[in-house]
Image: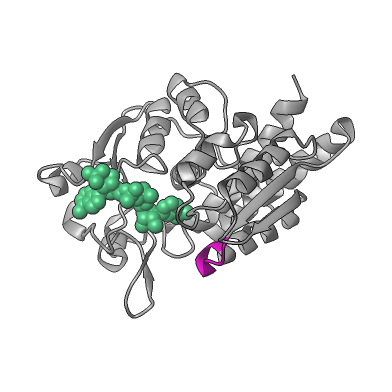
Amino acid sequence: MPHSPKILDGKKLSQAVSRTLSKRIADNRGALGRVPGLAVVLVGEDPASKTYVASKHRFAKECGIRTFDATLPASVSADQLAETIRRFNTDGEVDGILLQLPLPKPLDGAHFTRMIAPEKDADGLHPLNQGLLLQGLPAPRACTPLGAMTMIDLALSDVELGDTTTLADIPKASLAGKRAVVIGRSQLVGKPLGILLLERNATVTFAHSKTPDIQAVCREADILVAAVGVPELVKADWVKPGAIVIDVGINRLADKRLVGDVAYNEVAPLTAAITPVPGGVGPMTVAMLMSNTVENWLRRNIP
Ligand code: NAP
């Protein structure tokens, strides 16, 4: 009998996040006297960065987050950029600061990310917040891993996404007894995602470019996450039948097609659930940036 996997639709799930955030804002704005604010710092003219920033603006508007923009030329000095970040750090209306990466050379993205006040970190990439993640303490978490975790919850639930679904409808799954393999160990995705899976009691393996017999390691996974950046690396013989497969990769091919790190057509029929590319984890990353901003707003204002 042909098997049809659950396709984890990131666009629809991000709409459920948007509805959830709109409600949280409506419920709290009276008491807090204002809506959450997100500052968006864009440096230079990189077309991909501009597209990402535009989609973040749209999402913020949709869920009722106010945005503050700083659009700076690629020639901006390190001092001017630092001053912009400091201004947002002390602005009482701003709860989240997004510094769109990569920065044009010679500006160092990691250096300026560290300048963002940790309590206003929207991306969850500040070293203090990554340390709090390791300690299991509340803090903004990295957006892509958070989005991937919500996809896993959806995969393990009976929920069919509809026009009124919110995150409250999707239970947080216990992953006790499940083997999770994360391919990739970057600060941005692989490492924080592995820790989030561990927090949920999964038994976690990190695989990477030095992992011998990586196919066999991946075949043990009940939950397989690919965050690699190699087009269609994960083939059918890397996947245990019935696994949940989360494809974080976004790779642009020479013919302009966008593909993930998973060879979708051959892998999907084997899986219980899988994310498409595009339209999978990508929209959820943007949604989680907004979620972090709303959580920061609440955390900063409600002791
Ligand atoms: P990264 O910093 O380049 O890390 C890639 C990781 O993959 C490294 O840990 C590397 O191992 C590992 N790797 C590379 N080639 C491998 C191979 N052949 N076999 C096994 N492991 C291999 O990338 P990243 O920032 O984590 O991003 C990964 C992918 O996700 C990219 O396609 C990126 O565009 C995408 N992404 C998507 C979103 C989204 O919103 N959907 C967000 C962020 C990133 P070593 O550590 O051993 O070198």
Q: Nearer the viewer, residue 127 or 264?
A: 127
Tag count: 0
Q: Which residue is drawn at 28% across and 64% down?
A: 231
Q: Which residue is drawn at 51% across and 26% down?
A: 128
Which residue, as the protein is rendered here, is positioned at the far bottom?
255
Q: Which of 177 and 113 is in front in this view?
A: 113
Query: Is residue 8 among what the camera can see?
Result: no
Residue 232: horizontal and vertical position, in percent?
Answer: 27, 63
Q: Which of 139 and 222 is in front in this view?
A: 139
Quadrant of the drawing holding the N terminus: bottom left
Q: Residue at x 27, y 59 (%)?
A: 230
Q: In this view, does 263 lie to the left or right of 296?
A: left
Q: In this view, does 22 lie above or below 2?
A: above
Q: Residue at x 67, y 34 (%)?
A: 295
Query: Is residue 148 among what the camera can see?
Result: yes
Q: Give the range drawn in magenta.
A: 44-49
Residue 69: horizontal and vertical position, in percent?
Answer: 72, 54
